[in-house]
Every structure is written in C-alpha cells, then in structure tokens.
Image: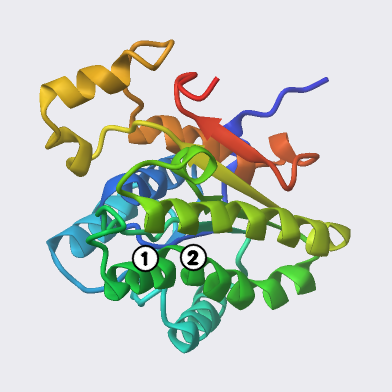
Amino acid sequence: MKKISVMNRLKGMNIVVTGAARGIGRVIALMFAEYGANVAFTGRKIDDNFTGLEQKLKTFGGKVKGYVSDASDFEVAQKTATEIVKDFGSIDVLINNAGITRDNLILRMSEKDWDDIMNVNLKSVFNWTKAVIRPMMKARKGSIINMSSVVGTGGNAGQSNYAASKAGIIGFTKSIAKELGSRNIRCNAIAPGFIETEMTKKLPQNVIDEWLAKIPLKRTGTPEDVANACLFLASDLSSYITGQVLTVDGGMTI
C-alpha cells in the first residue's frame, strides 16, 4: 500500500481558524500553511499580530486571507463565512479556536465576566458551526474541530465560567457529530492541558511546578502539540473518528 504523507493529505485543503491572530490559534494556522493548506483566519481587529500572521502565512505559498470578524457575533460570523466561500471556493475544515478567560472566584465574578466567556467561548462555536454547515453539506464532507479544555472535563477553582463554556463545547461537539455524520461531516473536540502560552508564562514558578508534578510526561505542552492534534483530526487519517474529545495534556488527567 502506498503511504501518503500528512502534508499531501492536507495540501490544497481550505482551512478556517477563528481567533488565530495570536497564541495557539496562530501556531495552528502556521502549521496548516506549512503543510500546504489554504488558510483563512479571523481576528477581532487589525493589529501587528494580525498583519504579521497574514504575511508569514503567505510565505508558504498557499492562498491566505485574514478577516476582521467577531466570532461571538452571529450575523458577522455568517457574513464572514460567506465571504470565505466566495474567496476560497469551499470550507473543508473549521477550527473553532476563539476564546478568552475572565477568571475569578464565583463570589467575585460579575455577570459580565460570565456573559463574555459564554459569548466568546461557547456561542462563537455555535455561530461558526452554523455558518459552515451548508457549504460542507453541499460538498458532503467536512471536519469541524472545537477547542475545549481539560478544565471543561474536570473543573477548576476560579474558572467556573471558563469550565462551563468548555464543558458546553464538548456536549455541543457530540451532538453535532450525531446530527451530521450521515453527511460525512465529522465533529471532534480537543482538550488541551497545561500549554505554554503568554498567559501561563506569567505564572509564578511555584505554580508551574505544582502543575508539572501532576503531569506524567513532566513537561508543559506546547502550542505545536495542540496543532499536531488538529492536523490529525483535519486529515483523512481520522476519517472514522467523530464525536470524540482528544485530550492533549501529557497524561495530567489520567
């Protein structure tokens, strides 16, 4: 049997990554472009991160375009998805990555802290999934990858809003997988653990050490570890996998 590399499996595919201007989303977009995919990405505003990513993505040779789009706004998501289909011809893979944190103990958490998290982290997943369904159904294929978190399966003190949003993503993922499987559209979630980001790098060393003590692999994860999981779920290497939560945490939640 002739083996086909992951790069060849992804070459020419049209990928959409929401919230990709920085952090994990940025690395995901760059890795897909490196593997030959065409990349459409969204960000809430044009800044150095946005323009810098767009320029870097273009160096890989595929079709690239960034869109200023608030993932938490339903109408904006629908309009942006329509523009992407017009510009790229189709949407093969959607990666719902947009997300924020508003951490606080429930005693101090404001209604706005709760609503902001639900709108950006959870409602955006509905908005964009809804937006890509028709073009994917027309093509009778597609892969939707939703970014959840180990906090969504195990909870975390001071993150009740974040945990609720990420747990909601898991339930949504499993439901969409059941609804759209007959149309050859797969829907899976990724649950990252302790990943090196701008936010985690600011944590005190003693806090980092406490987390490391819980991780069998004895290291923090990298955005590349998460991006690699996205590559797998986007390609036909995972063609018989849907409705699943792929945990990327170094064994922390064993």
Q: CA distance from mark 2 to mark 1?
A: 7 Å
Q: Which mark is residue 122?
A: 2
> Where, by quadrant of the figure, is residue 245 drawn?
top right
Q: Which mark is residue 201?
A: none
Q: Secondary structure at mark 2?
A: helix
Badge 1 is on which residue? Answer: 117
| In contact (CB < 8 Å): disc 2 and disc 1 | yes
> Where, by quadrant of the figure, is residue 135 drawn?
bottom right
Is residue 14 shown to the viewer in this render?
Answer: no
Q: Earlier in the sequence, mark 2 or mark 1?
A: 1
Query: Which residue type does callout 2 highlight?
Result: Leu
Image height check: is 2 above or below 134?
A: above
Q: Secondary structure at mark 1?
A: helix
Left or right of residue 8: residue 22: left
Query: Which residue type does callout 1 highlight?
Result: Ile
**Residue 222: x and y, percent?**
33, 29
